[in-house]
Image: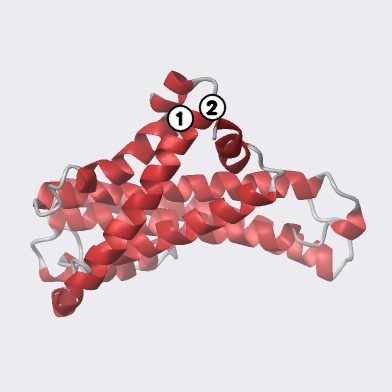
Amino acid sequence: MKKIFQEIFYNPKSKKFILVNNFLSFLTILSVISISAETVKSLEGYKNLFYFVEIFSTIFFSIEYFGRIIGTEKKLKYIFSFFGFIDLFSVLPTILGLGNLTFLKSVRLFRILRFLRILRVTKLAKYQKSKLKEEENNNLVKINLEIYLTTFFLFAFASAVSIWLIDGEREAFSSIPGSLIWSIKILLGGVPQVEPSNFWGDLVVITTRFFGLILLALMINLIANIFKKFILNEKTSA
């Protein structure tokens, strides 16, 4: 059992590692979308579907959490690591059966930090590809694009969840999807039609604009790589 979990969670060269982590990445995205949709009042009729997605994802995230503990030699290091806490908080509120409390529903939104694990897996794939010969290196642009999009939506969701928690009593921020549109506009350099009502909301705006500049730098680098690859026919930088 230990060898199986080692191969699945700690061996990026294994096909099982890629397959399982791609599934968990998809499940992370599905789970975050489901939790966000729960905040939309017009979708209350789908609460059974959202509950099913929550239970389904929690089962697999729990298997992942305990699988990582079993598969590693340094168990305490993982348990008390950054990703260890993220994995724990991804399942703990639901396992405790306290999901009906508003605060614990908010705690479940820590699951968006699992996007960092998606980034980590994508970076590992990029590293493996960067060691191949040039003729076998055609996927680097695609991987760079995946990294950019994952980073973009991580920042966008984090900003949307923050403003929803801070200013969710106002109609403009009453749901996470609505807040997400607001945060995407700010990340892209736009001027929000609705301003936050307090200091913490203003801090979210400032932070989001800062990350928007980081994303702009990533986009410039991505466009430069695409230009070199497909226009100048040069090797894409890792």
* Amino acid type for the residue under numbered disc 1: Ile
In this rendering, would 71 be left or right of 168?
A: right
Question: Residue 8: which numbered mark, if any?
Answer: none
Question: Residue 72: which numbered mark, if any?
Answer: 2
Q: Which residue is mark 1?
A: 69
Residue at x 76%, y 61% (from the top left corner): 139
Question: Could you tell me how far apart the alpha carbons at marks 2 and 1 are, in whole angstroms?
Answer: 6 Å
Residue nearer the viewer, 106 or 96: 96
In this rendering, would 193 be left or right of 86?
A: left
In the structure shown, which secondary structural element does the residue marked by tag 1 occupy? helix
**Would residue 36 be seen by someone viewing this image from the given angle?**
no
**Would residue 28 be seen by someone viewing this image from the given angle?**
yes
In this rendering, would 76 be left or right of 19?
A: left
**76 w.r.t. 229: above or below:** above
Residue at x 20%, y 76% (from the top left corner): 46
Coordinates of residue 156 in the picture (x, y in percent): 38, 59
Coordinates of residue 39 in the picture (x, y in percent): 18, 66
In this rendering, would 19 be left or right of 98?
A: right
In the structure shown, which secondary structural element does the residue marked by tag 2 occupy? loop
